[in-house]
Amino acid sequence: MIGFEYYNPAKIVFGEDSELKLKGLLEDHGVKSLLLVYSGDFIRELGIYSVIEKATSELGIRFTENGIVVPNPSIDLVRELVAQGKKDKVDFVLAVGGGSAIDTAKAVAIGIPYDGDAWDFFEKGVIPKEVLPVGVIATTASSGSETSNAAILSSGEWKLGFEDDRIIPRFAIMNPRFTAGLPKYQTFVGIADVLSHLLERYFSDEKHSDTTDYLIEGAVRALLLNADRLLKDPGDVNARGEIQWLASVAHNNFLDAGRRADWGSHRIEHELSAQYNITHGEGMAVAMTAWIRYVSGVKPWRPALLASRVFGVDPYDYSEKERALILADSLEDLFRKWGVKTRLTELGIDERDFEVMAGRATRNGSVGHYIPLDADTIREILKLAL
């Protein structure tokens, strides 16, 4: 078990009518000028917009909004919002939605106090001197960005991340009923995203991490159990609540304690979604199963352990390599049951851009920690994903 520091100041406000506590939360932070970031009219349909309007009106908060956030959020929109935020002297950014809205809000929060281009934080590794506070009303169960210290943005060609504990949202309001109207596809690509965050952390080369091993295995079991419940009854609010909380647990860095997560599959997926604008959760289903198939022939012990402990594959009957391959097959079957694609060909993607994507992913050297991946290895994994 390796040494670690854990810090997460996000206040979680979870459950029925939790959004009604927004006024008190904004008052606690002394907000004077708020920028609301979201995507589409759903926040009006869910009644969230009226709650925000009422709270800001009663507190005398200046209220600016932008509702055109898109999946795989763009630096171009962030630049627009930063300019607007500077003009309106915004001192708090509120995101309503899922990972795209939240990551946009985080980027705006570091961009408004900065004199340069917000892309500098993502491309050049500039460390912000000042960060505006961010709050979240989560309406999906997927990215876990509502309690994470990371944001991912796209420039069209590049999809890059930025990490800093100061962009962890000050609060995250989670009412599971807000997720009940999500279509099946959006629900289950979100669940695939949650699963990918759990697996990235599980695939660690640390052999003495029993506490987090069992915590992650338990979280995977709970996720699969509640996913099955949603297949039977999409309106099961208790199942949606379990999954929404798991999305946060999977990505608030608590499960990193004592271990080093891999993240190689995510770097591959970021190239796919940058190149083809595919949905992240679906891209992770493709990348993760192909990565496990590759790893089965190189270092299979971690996937084999998960196959035995969670999927019940008997270690006396199968070798580590066989168990790792069974895990890949089991996950692929699971994703297909959820209606999530698992092959690049299903997404209309062939190998013509593999070299370009592999080169971009490794521009600063190999990626991934369980097994470092160079450009040649990434191309090989992408071929396994066809």
Image: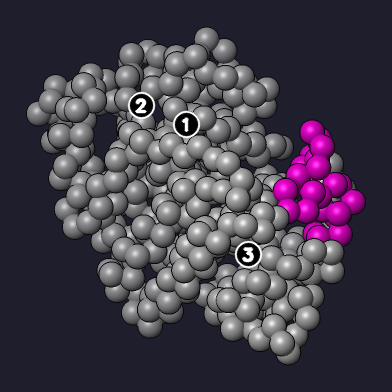
Q: Amino acid at mark 3?
A: Ala
Q: Which residues are magenta?
A: 360-386
Q: Amino acid at mark 1?
A: Asp
Q: Is residue 213 visible?
A: yes
Question: Image point 50% across, 52% down: which residue?
Answer: 255
Disc 3 crowd, CA 10 A, few/some/many (<14, 14-19, 20+):
many
Does the residue at mark 2 contact the one at mark 3 (Cβ under 8 Å)? no
Question: Image point 64% across, 24% down: which residue?
Answer: 125
Relative image position of residue 332 (x, y in whole percent):
65, 75
Q: Which residue is mark 1?
A: 165
Relative image position of residue 252 (x, y in whole percent):
45, 46
For marks 2 and 3 on the same chain, the one whose residue lies earlier in the sequence: 2
Q: Residue furthest right?
A: 376
The span from disc 2 to disc 3 (Cα, nearest Å) is 33 Å
Q: Residue furthest top?
A: 115
For marks 1 and 3 on the same chain, the one whose residue lies earlier in the sequence: 1
Specify whether residue 71 is painted magenta: no
Lateral position of residue 210 relative to residue 87, left or right: right
Q: Quadrant of residue 26?
A: top left
Q: Is residue 289 visible?
A: no
Q: Nearer the viewer, residue 299 or 120?
A: 299
Element assignment for label 1: helix
Q: Which residue is mark 2?
A: 133
The span from disc 1 to disc 3 (Cα, nearest Å) is 28 Å
Element assignment for label 2: loop
Question: Image point 80% across, 59% down: which residue?
Answer: 382
316 over 228 or under it: above or below: below
Q: Which residue is mark 3?
A: 285
The span from disc 1 to disc 2 (Cα, nearest Å) is 11 Å
Q: Amino acid at mark 2?
A: Pro
Element assignment for label 3: helix
